[in-house]
Amino acid sequence: MKVEKFVEIVGSDFYTGVPDSQLKPLCNYLMMKYGINKEHHIIAANEGNCVAIAAGYHLATGKIPVVYMQNSGEGNIINPVASLLSGKVYAIPMIFIIGWRGEPGVPDEPQHIFQGEVTIKLLEDMGIQAFVLTKETTEDKLTDIMAQYRGLLELGRNVAFVVRKGALSYDAKVKYENAYCMKREEIIEHIVQVSGDDPIISTTGKASRELFEIREKLGQGHQYDFLTVGSMGHSSSIALGVAINKPNTKVWCIDGDGAVLMHMGALAVIGATAPENLVHVVINNGAHETVGGMPTVAESLDIVSMAIACGYSYAVSVDNTRDLERALMTAKTNVGLCLIEAKCAIGSRDDLGRPTTSAIENKNMFVEYLKGL
């Protein structure tokens, strides 16, 4: 179904969400029609943030908002759905549009498999009535479903469209870019060279895929790295847990701007704990690039000042390889909690592969390596 027709039938004029590759036609359409517009479209930090924004929109206007997300974000909405939207609390109506990664019977990455299995059940458990949108869904069928949904929404209920791969289409081409020159894979290779045998915890998405391929290219083992293939926004907290318990080992975290935004409170906890052996590298391209390139608000943030305010003893922002090398070497030899923001371009190799080891194999190799440190 053309996304333009889908949006017309849904009939809302306010969308907030976290981008998803399965929903790329919708995300691109919203960016082309509205851009980032506080009256019609906000890309939020995480899915719970979306629900709260949408709730405020409804309270102020009386109209029905739409929240879009990948199904991995269902965990982030459980609390506000159960304790804010629920008919047993405030009865705030909302439409959810959810990309179905890991759908049973459809091959996908390991982090999506279990989430895909429980996607519909989680919605049912939260009292959210769901309709699965497929390539075969007609405009008439969608119109009928929306007529049913409007009756539920008037009662303060929540409803959802779970979107299968390829169910929505959008013909316009959207290109996301910024003014920075460094490439993320180039930044990660510099980190690998400077970190040596130190353990690295890398964030979900293309950063972990690139780290894996860099090790392959250099003929190095993968035992040094924990590839956080899911749980977006938590790699820095995993790194904190490792650093606390391996105080005599330098521990590196390769993070992304979207991941940092998703659970920004982690910065405060890391700063307050202040492990002297942790280096937190935030690769900032101002985009949710792994799922299509839609923007984050991170390009306009002063991440260095935020880190210092949270208690990091050393924080610097770089946008070229010379300054990156200098910052990495300082962090390598520095005793104290470090943050390096590396500003980079949007984009990756077309032939970028995926890890050939399983998540369990990766964990086991990493755990065995840590035992020897």
Image (cartoon, helix red, strand yellow):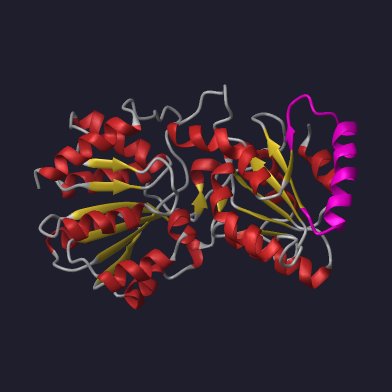
Q: Quadrant of the rendered structure where residue 171 is? A: top right
- Left or right of 367, for residue 206: right
Query: Which residue corresponds to the image point at 54% horizontal and 50% vertical from the top-left?
Result: 75
As rendered, which of 32 and 163 lies closer to the eye? 163
As rendered, which of 268 and 75 lies closer to the eye? 75
Q: Position of residue 269 (x, y in %)?
A: 34, 69
Q: Position of residue 21 (x, y in %)?
A: 58, 39
**Residue 159 vertical placement versus 49 (above, below):** above
Query: Which residue corresponds to the image point at 19% horizontal and 61% vertical from the top-left?
Result: 331
Q: Position of residue 103 (x, y in %)?
A: 58, 29
Query: Which residue corresponds to the image point at 66% horizontal and 31% vertical from the top-left?
Result: 164
Q: Quadrant of the rendered structure where residue 99 is? A: top right
- Left or right of 77, for residue 240: left
Query: Which residue corresponds to the image point at 54% horizontal and 44% vertical from the top-left?
Result: 72
Residue sitting at the far front: 88
Q: Position of residue 140 (x, y in %)?
A: 90, 32
Is residue 85 visible from the viewing direction of this image? Answer: yes
**Residue 236 vertical placement versus 197 (above, below):** below
Point out the image quarter for the N terminus. Answer: top right
Region of the chain picked out in magenta, as a range: 131-157
Is residue 326 visible from the viewing direction of this image? Answer: no
Residue 337: in magenta span: no
Residue sitting at the far bottom: 309
Residue 139: in magenta span: yes
- Left or right of 343, for residue 108: right
Please give the count of numbered marks on the rendered protein. 0
